Image (cartoon, grey):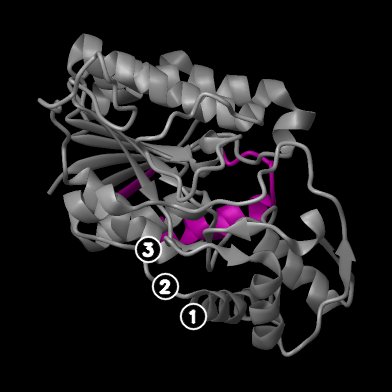
Amino acid sequence: MAKILVTGAAGFIGYHLSEKLLAKGHEVVGLDNVNDYYDVGLKEARLARLEGKPGFRFVRMSLEDRDGCAALFAAERFDSVVNLAAQAGVRYSIQNPYAYIDSNISGFINILEGCRHNKVGHLVYASSSSVYGANTSMPFSVHHNVDHPVSLYAATKKANELMAHTYSSLYGLPTTGLRFFTVYGPWGRPDMALFLFTRAILEGRPIDVFNHGKMQRDFTYVDDIVEGVTRVVDRVPAGDPAWQGSHPDPGTSYAPYRIYNIGNNNPVELLRFIEVLEQALGREAKKNFLPIQAGDVPATYADVDDLIRDVDFRPATSIEEGIGRFVSWYREFYRI
């Protein structure tokens, strides 16, 4: 079994991924700085469920700690790395742009350098559907151009893809970027819509519904995301012999580099999402309709054909099932 570094292990996806990898028998070193971007108590509760499990060790550190990262990579000699640590959130990137440069750019170069100098066999890293930005051609394909981001968060994720390609080309480091589409589920992030809506509805407060409810999102259940990630970790990319510089394909390369979408391949209108949540909670939401926010896009929709072809997996959990599981977890965790 492999020794795998999971950064952002106290985070939403990182916690679920760590559990999955441990269940498969891998040794997992979890890294996280447990910052206060959202409720630290929730992060610590996730960690408490991981610590003590056979094969899991935790390192409390920031990706920006260049010397600390270098020492960790040199000491551990990881087989694979899954980089999920990042400053998340489209809207927060407008308020605090420097946090995104520190974590998502400076932190990511430390990961790349650690992989390069210690012969890591595969780097898998989180990108985002946000990179599609001003694109309106649906469904979003990894073979589309993504040069028009509409938030700094998206720009840093696009930068990660470019940085990874450089290291794949220069040093032969196998890298795979995963563009996640609106992940939700138990142990989710309190700054995301499902968590915010659930809390407000249960407290009798109105919910803010942006773009007057006309948003569409390819909501993807966390277990589907994690299954896709674990399959990708096992599939180390090689250069694409069909790639041509005269007609460059953004999703592949002559280098050992790949990009995949992981989405449900089924966009859902925000008002339908809210309706399913109301049914799960047994309460009606008070809705405050608002214009679209700066940095947001009106719709996302993932083309997952490459993921299906290469790792034989298509995310498929319905929002009815996924929201039901989230509500059950929320009531249990918060004793409601």
Q: Residue at x 52, y 49 (%)?
A: 11
Residue contact at pointers 3 and 1, CB within 8 angstroms:
no
The quarter holding residue 100 reads top right
Nearest the eye: 61 or 253: 253
**Residue identifier under label 1:** 321
Can the viewer see residue 64?
Answer: no
Q: Are there few (<14), some (14-19), or many (20+) residues within 10 Å of tag 2?
A: some
Label 2 sits on a secondary structure element that is loop
Q: Is residue 261 magenta?
A: no
Residue 72 at what x, y percent from top left? 34, 25
Residue 317: mark: 2
Disc with the residue nearer the chain's start (3 vs 1) = 3
Q: Residue at x 55, y 51 (%)?
A: 300
Hey, what amino acid is under mark 1?
Glu
Hey, what amino acid is under mark 3?
Asp
**Residue identifier under label 3:** 224
Nearest the eye: 36 or 322: 322
* In the image, residue 67 above or below residue 260: above
Residue 15 at what x, y percent from top left? 44, 54
The quarter holding residue 334 reads bottom right
Residue 228 at what x, y percent from top left? 30, 55
Horizontal side, residue 287 vs residue 237: left or right: right
Residue contact at pointers 2 and 3, CB within 8 angstroms:
yes
Q: Quadrant of the C terminus?
A: bottom right
Q: CA distance from mark 3 to mark 1?
A: 12 Å
Q: Residue at x 60, y 39 (%)?
A: 88
Label 1 sits on a secondary structure element that is helix
Q: What span is in magenta?
A: 33-58
